[in-house]
Amino acid sequence: MILIFPYILASVFTTVLNVIAIILLLKLAHKFQWYDDVDHRKIHEGEIPRIGGVGISISFFAAVFFMPVFLGLLSEKIIISRPIVLFWSLLLGSIIVNLVGILDDFTNLRPLYKLIGQIAATLVIIFSGNYFTSFYIPFFDITLKSNFFGQIITFIWIIGITNAINLIDGMDGFSSSITALISLIMGIAAIVSGNYMQAFILFILFGSISGFFIFNFPPAKLFMGDSGSLFIGFILACIPLYSFNGELSSYTLILGISFLIIPILDTFAAIIRRKIRGVPFHTPDMDHLHHKLLAMNISERMIIFITGTVTLIVSGTALLFVIFRSNMFIYLQLFIWILMVIIFIILSHKTKNRP
């Protein structure tokens, strides 16, 4: 029986690290006036720092590099399937993305420069041999092997998810609550599938985001900024490539979509919306999911509860497949995808003519 205690300890340890880091960062931010810009698109008012991503990354890397040693001294029963050095590509890629985000938070990088940084980080993952190698096709019950095609899909997937998490980061506690839950459920799935070090990384990420969420819960005292959203999005996009291998490898894309369905649908809606309007994809607007729910007079805290519940349901369905390995849960996931697309369309229609 695999002990869950080390993973809980990793999360708690990382949460405490981030809380300490954020307290120090907040003092620096107020001293040097590192505040988020306020404009007509922003929901918040007042002087709020957006350097939470720095605390998330600092606590994450500190825990990743030092917790294995601490846990190894704590108990000889802890099972770690792969040494952390085998995840060098994930760590290097996330460092690149985090640095790009930090630069953007302080200097407002051009979208092209941000994209170049994301491409560099993504290529690190692909060239290290981590990409979709096969795809399960539901209904036909066949598995397609891939090589170059899988690399292309992986490239689109990582860039897309990285930016999807960035796009949903527009309301107090919204992105942090969703990504924390995704990290937790995905971490449990990694344990179930026997990928213990991957689970370790995900529980650490959960701890980092949880520490930040304490300060980001509405009304927020701190924002994660692009350094946080791009960093979290990149890791959540990449980690399934490391976690779901062996007999689960052909289901990696389906599982990844289920875990990340809310940011994926919100991003697709943004692409379609901006295509219709004839504006570049990176053009900001106030039509994201949280904007639509706010327009229906739903409070920020209730929105967090609703989207968190949906995330648990969809992610939980993916987890059930990992546990029982029954295609029934694949079809259940597909049904939920369709249901959520319908809900997005209804929301879009109901808020189309709002002021």
Image: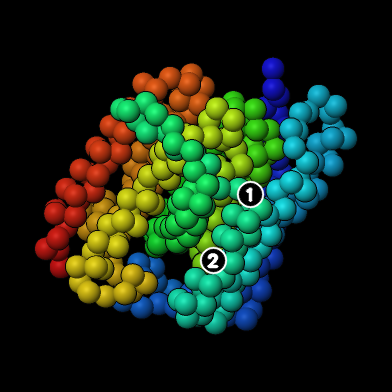
The vertical placement of 249 against 94, above or below, is above
The residue at the far left in this view is: 353
Q: Position of residue 15 (x, y in %)?
A: 65, 48
Location of the N terminus by quadrant is top right
Amino acid at the residue labelled 1: Gly
Badge 1 crowding class, 10 Å Cα cut-off, few under 14, some 14 to 19, many 20 or more, is few
Q: Secondary structure at mark 1?
A: loop
The residue that appears at 54% across and 82% down in the rendered structure is: 107
Query: Quick one: 188 or 218, which is closer to the camera?
Result: 188
Q: Secondary structure at mark 2?
A: helix
The residue that appears at 75% across and 33% down in the rendered structure is: 80
Q: How many numbered marks are there?
A: 2
**Residue 339 visible:** yes
> Which residue is labeled 1 in the image?
129
The vertical placement of 254 against 23, above or below, is above
Location of the C terminus by quadrant is bottom left
The dot on residue 119 is 2
In the figure, is residue 342 to the left or right of 154? left
Residue 31 location, quadrant: bottom right
Query: Quick one: 59 or 202, which is closer to the camera?
Result: 202
The dot on residue 149 is none
Residue 122 location, quadrant: bottom right
The residue that appears at 19% across and 55% down in the rendered structure is: 348
For marks 2 and 1, give the CA distance.
Answer: 16 Å
Amino acid at the residue labelled 2: Ile
The residue that appears at 72% across and 44% down in the rendered structure is: 13
